[in-house]
Amino acid sequence: MTKIIGLTGGIGSGKTTIAKMFAEYGIPVYIADDEAKQLMQSEELVSAIFKKFGSSIFDDGKLNRAKLAAIVFNDAEKLKLLNEIVHPAVKKHFEKWLLGHNDQLYVIYEAAILFESGRYRDCDYIITVNAPVDVRIQRVMQRDNSSKEEVLNRINMQWNDLQRSEKSNFVINNIDIVAVKQEIVKILKILDIKQNDS
């Protein structure tokens, strides 16, 4: 049976980059946040979000993700409400995706809020990616054109590095790219995954 390796880390930790490094070894990778963005464009989820959040987050009938983010990342209850809409859809989508990869020894399930959402319970192993908070803030500010305050709001909505690390099988400190690559090789050896020659 295919084993699920959960890969998580706070916003800006570089977990998606690391997920792609695992993919280079031929391991299928599911990026939950990317899939959630796609699913949030579906008629079913758009309708559910409209019912809970109203028309103010829509421009000409299209969901404005920036407006929605401004609401939910400043209000824990609103974030919980959104997650109750999106998480079941992502879980269902992942289960279908997993069926298409059941010939694999392992798959990577990458999610920012793996622990907060409870999805960690579905994983056989968990890898946490850590990085200094100031580095994470700079990365996200540059990537999303966000303010420092907006990034800190998101960080404060998530578990901290220590909380995630204590519940993980492996921890990657994403500071030096060479050290990260060595850590990935070490994890793959521990998981007894044969590396591709390429």
Image: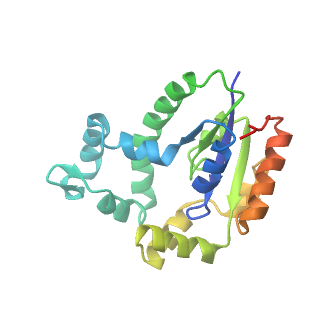
If the image is split into quadrants, where does the C terminus sit? top right
Residue 115 in view here: no
Residue at 56% in and 53% down: 112
Residue 164 position, x and y percent, is 70, 55
- Nearest the camera: 91 or 7? 7
Q: Which scheme is used to colour this image of the protein?
A: rainbow
The answer to whether 3 is drawn above or below residue 151 in the figure is above
Residue 139 in the image, given as x and y percentages of width and height: 54, 71
User: Left or right: 166 with respect to 97?
Assistant: right
Q: Position of residue 94 (x, y in %)?
A: 52, 32
Instruction: Identify the image quadrant of the N terminus.
Output: top right
Count the numbered circles shown.
0
**Nearer the observer, 149 or 131:** 131
Q: Which residue is drawn at 51% across and 44% down?
A: 32
Image coordinates of residue 72 in percent, x first then y, are 39, 59
Q: Residue at x 14, y 53 (%)?
A: 60
Tell whether 155 sits left or right of 43. Answer: right
- Left or right: 32 with respect to 13? left
Q: Is residue 171 above or below residue 1?
A: below
The quarter of the picture where residue 180 lies is bottom right
The quarter holding residue 138 reads bottom right
Q: Is residue 27 left or right of residue 16?
A: right
Q: Report the residue that reaches farthest toward the left.
A: 60
Residue 93 visible in rendering: yes
User: Which residue is most to the front?
Assistant: 198
Foreground of the two, 163 or 91: 91
